[in-house]
Image (cartoon, grey):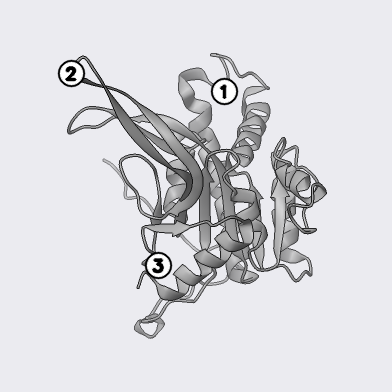
Amino acid sequence: MATATPLPTRQAGAKPVKRMSMSDMRTTGRNLPTRLVMHGLEGCGKTSYAAFAPKPVFIMTAGETGLETLIDSGQLPEIPHFPEVQTWLDLLGILDAMLEDEHDRQTLVIDTGNGAERLCHEEVCRRDYNGDWGKQGFTSYMQGYDVALADWRLFLAKLDRIREQRRMAIIVLCHTKITTFKNPTGADYDRYEPKMHAKTWGLTKEWADIILFADYETEIIRGRRDNETAKGKAVGGSYRTMRTVRTATFDAKNRHGLPEEIEMGVSGKEAWNNFVNAMKKKGG
């Protein structure tokens, strides 16, 4: 005869867990700073945009040193930043320092999110698969990417702690890529998404309050050939814009009632100011 599973008992010395009561209900938010992700094409002004956020500090992942180039060339003023981060553990250590050490920074910029993901995967491969990226290791049935999700959740949780306890806004910059969307109701189509594994991006997309897609406005002029529409020719490309609402061609979202499109202007400062003004207007 099966025996009943004993009820769990509290260990001696453990503090009792406070039970929620009706008095814990609230009707307002906590007025926390924004969690923002920006993805876009190379050279469209992602780093320059984030550089004009309030009191920023940049974490540059391996190979992502565009900020230093912009500073050295005089395109940006001197901006506080950490040395190029080479390992996942170093990245987590910097986040701990941002949480625990004294500083006056108000915005934490991760440059880039896909670079941070790469560091995460390298650490998981080293730690759990003896550095083997092959079919017997990290990429075996793509399981390494699933294992790494727990580490990525830890990363996002650390960002949330910085946001909540230090009242810092979080900006994650990402490169973008063209992916094929498997359309269950019709033909598949191509769209822009951050250059990350789909499952990593899924977690990040849920976490973010705002996702901006930075793009160049491009006009397509269609030609005619033998009574058929020929391949179009792209013209323009100097007008930059931030998209705030998802469409079939790119990922974006916002929880602030922003207009669907915000002009970036001719500089990072103008792009940031236009974004701030749009936040104040709340899409009105």
Disc 3 vs disc 1: which is toward the camera? 3
**Residue marked by disc 1:** 138
**Residue marked by disc 3:** 256
Residue 197: x percent and y percent?
49, 33
Disc 2 vs disc 3: which is toward the camera? 2
Q: Is residue 42 left or right of residue 89?
A: left
Q: Nearer the viewer, residue 158 or 180?
A: 180
Q: Is residue 8 left or right of residue 87?
A: left
Q: Amino acid at mark 3?
A: His
| Discs 2, 1 touching: Cβ within 8 Å | no
Residue 224: x percent and y percent?
25, 22
- Secondary structure category for the residue under label 2: loop
Residue 7 seen in this snapshot: no
- Secondary structure category for the residue under label 1: loop
Q: Which callout, 2 or 3, points at the residue further toward the start of the chain?
A: 2
**Inter-mark Cα distance, 3 to 1:** 39 Å
Q: Nearer the viewer, residue 257 or 167?
A: 257
Q: Is residue 259 left or right of residue 172?
A: left
**Inter-mark Cα distance, 2 to 1:** 52 Å
Q: Nearer the viewer, residue 96 or 170?
A: 170
